[in-house]
Amino acid sequence: MKAVALLRTRIAFSEIAFAELSIWKVPKPVAGSSHSFKYRLAYVVNGICVVRYDNETGKGDHRHFGAAENAYTFHTPEKLMADFERDIMRWNRENRRS
């Protein structure tokens, strides 16, 4: 079995903010992960990636929020999307311009 793209899209939030989402079903887990999904979800504002969830080979599941990087416990693609959306809302709330 080859990798199968389950989701590959770009969502514009405003003139300066967008999200790129990619999730693939893979035949075997990527190094560092224990599930059969490869993913990269990124939220970009003013050309800077401010929120990202990914499981790059060898590094495993993790998330970036601003400058911080932390391990992420993957459960399902649906939970991943919900967590990503929650972090986008949090970033927007915490970085709101008055």
Image (tube, helix red, strand yellow):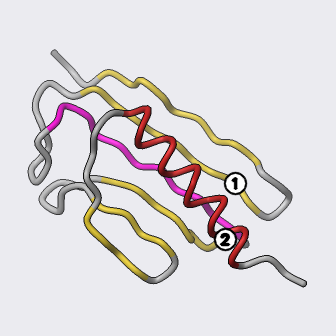
> What range is drawn magenta here?
35-45
SS for callout 2: loop
Left or right, 69 with reference to 48: left
Q: Quadrant of residue 96?
A: bottom right
The answer to whether 4 is drawn above or below residue 98 in the figure is above
Residue 42 is covered by the magenta coloring: yes
Q: Position of residue 79 (x, y in %)?
A: 41, 39
Q: Quadrant of the N terminus?
A: top left
Residue at image point 11% right, 42% down: 34
Q: Amino acid at mark 2?
A: Gly
Instruction: Looking at this view, name the residue that lies furthest to the top.
Output: 1
Q: Which residue is mark 2?
A: 47
Q: Which mark is residue 18?
A: 1
Up the image or down, 6 lies above or below 51; here it is: above
Residue appearing at x 69%, y 54% in the figure: 18
Look at label 1 and name its amino acid. Answer: Phe
Choose the circle earlier in sequence order: 1 or 2: 1
Q: x, y (%) of residue 11?
A: 69, 42
Closest to the observer: 90 or 31?
A: 90
Position of residue 33 in the picture relative to residue 11 (left or right)? left
Discs 1, 2 touching: Cβ within 8 Å: no
Q: Is residue 59 left or right of residue 40?
A: left
Measuring 32% from the left and 21% from the top, which residue is drawn there? Answer: 4
Quadrant of the rendering where the C terminus is positioned: bottom right
